[in-house]
Amino acid sequence: MTSYVNEKETLEIGIIGLGDMGLMYAKRIIASGWKKVNVCDRSENYEELKELLKDSGMNVCQNGHAVSRQSDFIIYSVEAENIDKVVAEYGPSTKLDAIVAGQTSVKEPEIRAFEKHLPGDVHIISCHSLHGPTVDPKGQPLVMIQHRAADEKFDIAMRVLSCMESEFVKLSYKEHDRITADTQAVTHLAFLSMGTAWKTQRQFPWETPQYVGGIENVKVHMALRIYSNKWHVYAGLAIMNPSAKLQIQQYAQSVSDLFKLMIQEKEIEFRTRVKKAGEFVFGKSSESREPILLSDTLLDKFSLSIVPKEKRKPNSHLSLLAMTDCWYTLEINPYEHMVCQTPLFRLWTGITEYLFRNTDMLEAAIHSALYSKDIRADDMEFYSASKGWAECVDIGNMQTYQKRFEDTAKFFESRFDESNKIGREMIKVITTKTHK
């Protein structure tokens, strides 16, 4: 115990990049008793940051060179698309025998940058908190990657980051990228496509009878939650993760295939495909598991809707049917990835699972998909949006991604504060249930 206390007094921790996640990490580390925390952001932000954090206990540095030269454990908390440039600039200044970690959402370019630009006598460890900066990290997954580091150095990193009170998950960087492609990239695409479809129709879903009820509340709040955040978080994960494009393309293809069957009203073929996918993902292997959602009514209270529930109309749930078809086609079992779940992925899997385990609701969705003209326009726009987002990711242009994202975000921005407040409560309900 004494050595650990001394370590908190003497070990210098550095954070390069004080965006939302970097600042959250710095505050948690300081609050847990580590005395020497060196931080920096872009040089032009130095004076403003120094004034803002003057009473925080942090040592605000001019730039990453100052952080790198004096810190024993350095965390790069920068955008995935900028990691190579930032490490190239500050990496050569890294202190002898220091530990260097990264907090990006995509690990292959991060590890590549570390190997290319860091001195050979530096220990490389990577980490990734699988949640946003406004979510309580307690009990959430925190991926730890011991890439090029002695065990004693890895232990130090674990001790420092234990302040997050998260559940450590040890993976390789390739495993991390494959799992986050399965869990995050496709989930984000679905919510992004919903938002774009609603914006294209100039439609607020909470004013529409097809979007009333617990499952619909998840769709609305999580889509708005994504669009209220910074675009680069999702762009980097989708475009820079080499494992993500296959999953994203398949999801868009599943939407397309199902939509074509719907508009042709090919009931037997449509029903067979949906049921086959559902049996693969949510069949016997999931029957012994406790459902992620207790019921649709669990989420009924988290609503923005101005439409009374008794006036709700059936929804085809094309987004959920296509997700299950995508998992089936790629032979992905989403339950295997719960070890690296994000709150969004857990909610997304939960509503999909609930739909397929509720025979009446699934039948209503299938019938609505094939024969309800009320929802056809929504499904057409969702199909177009998913295709557009998948093409954007395939091209790999960050500026195009940013424009698509911000155009949709602007349409919904007046409801972000209210929706995020409700969304946080929704996540708290689900994560509390998870960790009981």
Image (cartoon, helix red, strand yellow):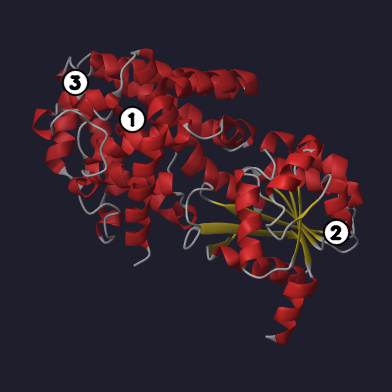
Image check: 326 left or right of 144?
left
**Residue drawn at the location 16% of the way across and 18% of the way down:** 372
Spatial CA span between label 1 and label 2? 45 Å
Residue 241 in picture, x, y percent from top left: 62, 37
Which element is circle 2 on?
A: loop
Choose the circle earlier in sequence order: 3 or 2: 2
Which element is circle 1 on?
A: helix
- Is disc 1 surrounded by few (<14), some (14 to 19) or many (20+) residues within 10 Å? many
Q: Which mark is residue 319?
A: 1
Residue 329 at least partly seen: no
Mark 2 is on which residue type? Val
Badge 2 is on which residue? 122
Badge 3 is on which residue? 370
Residue 6 at least partly seen: yes
Mark 3 is on which residue type? Leu
Q: Nearer the viewer, residue 17 or 317?
A: 17
- Mark nearer the viewer, 1 or 3: 1
**Residue drawn at the location 27% of the way across and 44% of the way down:** 279
Residue 145 in picture, x, y percent from top left: 66, 58
Image check: 411 left or right of 426?
right
- Mark nearer the viewer, 3 or 2: 2
State which quarter of the image contains the C terminus: bottom left
Choose the circle earlier in sequence order: 1 or 3: 1
Q: Nearer the viewer, residue 382 or 221?
A: 221
> In this rendering, is residue 247 above or below 103?
above
Spatial CA span between label 3 and label 2? 59 Å
Mark 1 is on which residue type? Ser
Spatial CA span between label 1 and label 3? 14 Å
- Is disc 2 surrounded by few (<14), some (14 to 19) or many (20+) residues within 10 Å? many
Determine contact: label 1, label 2, CB under 8 Å.
Answer: no
